[in-house]
Amino acid sequence: MIDRYSTPELRALWSEASKYRAWLKVELSAMDAQATLGEVPREAHTELVQKSQADPLDEAFALRVAEIEAVTRHDIVAFTTALSERYGEAARFVHHGLTSTDVVDTAQNLLLDESLTLVIADAQDMQAACRAQAVTYKYTPTVGRTHGIHAEPMTFGLKFLNWMATLNRDLERLHAARERVRVVMLSGSVGTYAHVSPQVEEMVAAGWGWEAAPITNQTLARDRHAEVLSALAIFGTTMEKIATEIRHLQRSEVREAMEPFGAGQKGSSSMPHKKNPILTENVTGLARLLRGYLVTGLENVPLWHERDISHSSAERVILPDAVQVASYAARRLTGVLKGLVVFPERMLKNMNDLGGLVFSQRVLHLLIDEKGMAREAAYGVVQRCALQSWETGEGLRELLERDPENPLSADDLDRAFDLQWYLRQADHIYARFGL
């Protein structure tokens, strides 16, 4: 991922040096288990641990691996060769009985585990921002819109509460996806344990607090990675849903809420008056990337026989990019949510601009429930006046007052056009979330 759309922590985590440190962690954990089982000398493992702690794998090591790989055309061979150069005789028992994918896939799971932990923290921060705004605007009236058209009154806080609830489900999916990749695979060529005992895999998994993959071939099944990408893509749609709503609310004709606009910020190179929703537009674009990564992840699931590497080149791009995009977009959107500029007066003005049309259903129900009108007749009265209001701009209440078929009194109409009546269940809804 380009630096523009990455976070410092994930950029460092997916660096080449970090990848090789993860590979070494797998190798050392396997050596530790093998030493316990008497399959390799304990002294070799101890020496290698000490040397790797005193002289950790760094960018210089990564460059050396790249030099060797240019000749060997094999990354693990280049890695083990560079280890021997760096740490000497102690590295002789590295990779004993393992195959390349044992190391690459298990180490990749380490990186995904750490990455998803960071993304989960970002999602939790976003959820906390939604929660705070839901409380702030719990009773702030605004108009609800369906199909982009005014529907009925609601509270602005309910928008944030809806997003908070969606993020609950996103967090469940992200946690589940992280658990899905917390598995160790050390089964050797084609997954038969012919050259490495199953106990090595089980001991490494137990030491990490993970699970041993119950069965593999020469690769870890890619449905696990597809599940990770799916959780990230769905999280992206949540972010896009929030971003799209804010973009609509910022439109000049609506202007009920807008992104924070910093001191010195410029909205346009040619139009000095512009305040554009660039942050949420950016999040919308990044959500499209996450969905695209999922498509590739799904296509990576079916591989030839016990292994091919058609997935490998794609994963080198989509896995680090997906977690970085998700983290970056989440932090950007959380900043928008925390700094959102809200205009409650404009919300009331917009609600009233249609002359009370948003109260039509309440009128309809009073005609049916209290005046005994048939539904079709009641609907006809209200719709006739409502359509006239649309055409002339005259208020719905005034038109109803003059309609000869409307039996509602002035007191009835007061109740029908009572804004607070529409908001009376807000406390009940919030109580479901402990608010």
Image: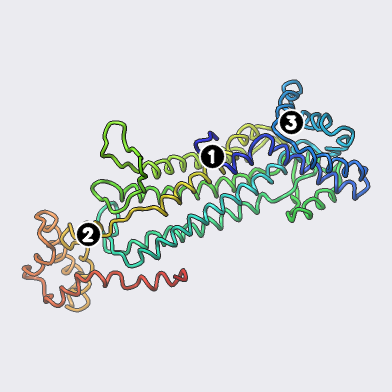
Residue indicated by mark 2: 351
Return the residue found at the far top. Answer: 71
**3D distance between C-alphas at marks 1 and 2:** 40 Å
Q: Nearer the viewer, residue 133 or 396?
A: 133
| In this rendering, position of residue 183 left or right of residue 431 | right
Earlier in the chain: of badge 1 and badge 3, it is: 1
Kindly report which numbered mark, 1 or 2, lies closer to the viewer in this rendering: 1
**What amino acid is labelled 3 in the image?**
Phe
Residue 401 lies left or right of residue 349; in this view the side is left
In this view, the residue in front, 366 or 172, is 172
**Amino acid type indicated by mark 1:** Ser
Mark earlier in primary sequence (1, 2): 1
Picture mark count? 3
**Res. 31 mark:** none
Question: How many C-alpha atoms fall within 10 Å of the one at disc 3: few (<14), some, or many (≥20)?
Answer: some
Percent coordinates x, y for residue 411 in the rendering:
14, 78
How many residues crowd around disc 2 within 10 Å: few (fewer than 14), some, or many (20 or more)?
A: many
Residue bearing mark 1 = 6
Residue pointed to by mark 3: 61
Q: Which quarter of the image is occupied by the N terminus? A: top right
- Mark 3 vs mark 2: which is more N-terminal? 3
